[in-house]
Amino acid sequence: MNRMSDRELLERAAMAGGVCVTYHHDSGTFYDTTAQGNPAMNLLSRPVWNPLDNDGDALRLAVAIQWLPTRTEFARLAAQPDPHAATRRAIVIEAVAKEEAATWKSPYDRR
């Protein structure tokens, strides 16, 4: 996997997790367009999606890609200065790696 910006990581992770997102250039924010509600709802009133910052989004992504860290991975993440941020980033990176693998298909893929 090449070095990617956070935006690229999030775009690829969303694909792996079967999450439909829309990027808002002015705010630099991804919005979850799969959210329940009125399809004509204003984009900015939809939920923000960012598993790099949000524990809930990261956990849902980990479940979607069926990621469970090994004991060694968990120990390495727990030893980081911010283990929560390190774990969220590890989940996103694992999602991107699975998205890159031609054989991976999320059971939640809505495409």
Image (tube, helix red, strand yellow):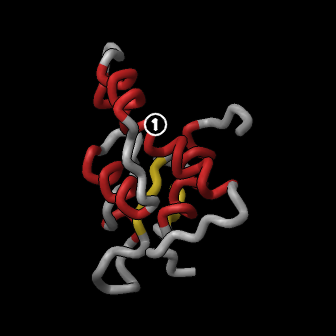
As helix, strand or loop, the secondary structure at mark 1 comes to: helix
Direction front: furthest residue: 71
Rendering coords of residue 85 (x, y %): 35, 30
Closer to the camera, 50 or 92? 92
Image quarter hosting the N terminus: top right
* Image quadrant assignment for residue 74: top left
* Image quadrant assignment for residue 47: bottom left
**Residue 16 located left or right of residue 83:** right
Task: Please report the residue visible at 28 percent of the width from the left and 83 percent of the height from the top.
Answer: 37
Rendering coords of residue 73 (x, y %): 41, 30
Task: Please report the residue visible at 42 percent of the width from the left and 59 percent of the height from the top.
Answer: 66
**Residue 3 located left or right of residue 9:** right
Closer to the camera, 93 or 70? 70
Q: Which residue is mark 1?
A: 90
| Residue type of the residue flagged with mark 1 | Ala
Rendering coords of residue 104 (x, y %): 61, 65
Disc 1 crowd, CA 10 A, few/some/many (<14, 14-19, 20+): some
Image quarter hosting the C terminus: bottom right
